[in-house]
Amino acid sequence: MAKKKKKEEETEVESETATEVKPEGEEGAEGEEGGHKKGKKKLVFIIAGAVALLIIIGVVLMMVMGGGKEEEMKSPEETEAALAAAAPVYYELPEFLVNLSSNSTRVSFLKMSVTLELRDAAAVAVVEANKPRILDTFNTYLRELRASDVQGSAGIYRLRDELMTRLNATIEEGLVKDILFSEIIVQ
């Protein structure tokens, strides 16, 4: 029995020293699981960092390459021309004075000043060439209106929409961007 106790004590001492002093690279069951988790975390961080770096580089390259081309292409003359093209172009039609449709013996009149906002300066020539047709279209429509049709802001918006629809049917679609009323009087 004494020999058995000695052997058990020796095995206990060996197991204690074996757990305390481990050669490098060898870990117990717990160490292997922790090492794999740490390795996976490091790998995820490395991949995420690389992806973020690639995205940042791509964005910087796009900004540098895209912005440089635009600045190189535009000279001061071109910039002024672009600003002039972006400025609105207006064309004022002559004043309209028409009888409104009425069921009573009382006569009502509509006096209206209209300005057209055009797409660009080249549109002025098209509008001038079609001016008689535009005036005819507007006068024909306006004579069919009643005084109640142009009352209030809702009536004015309907009038604008109808005139715009008829204008686009008369000349090129999109040539006129908007119809602006300078004066509207119903008597």
Image (cartoon, rainbow, N blue to C red):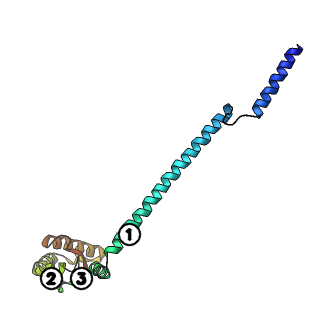
Task: Indicate the quadrant containing the N terminus: top left, top right, bottom left or bottom right.
Answer: top right
**x, y percent for residue 184:** 24, 83
- Crowd band around label 2 with a 10 angstrom C-alpha radius: few (<14), some (14–19), many (20+): some
State the CA–CA distance, disc 1 to disc 2: 58 Å
Asked if marks 1 and 3 touch (Cβ < 8 Å), the reply is: no
Q: Can residue 114 be seen in this view?
A: no
Amino acid type at circle 2 is: Asn
Residue 60, quarter of picture: bottom left
The outermost residue toward the front is: 23
- Left or right: 83 with respect to 145? right
Q: In this view, does 12 lie above or below 154?
A: above
Asked if marks 1 and 2 touch (Cβ < 8 Å), the reply is: no
Q: Mark 3 points at which residue?
A: 90
Camera-side mark, 1 or 3: 1
Amino acid type at circle 1 is: Gly
Task: Indicate the quadrant containing the C terminus: top left, top right, bottom left or bottom right.
Answer: bottom left
The numbered dot on residue 99 is: 2
Amino acid type at circle 3 is: Tyr
State the CA–CA distance, disc 1 to disc 3: 33 Å
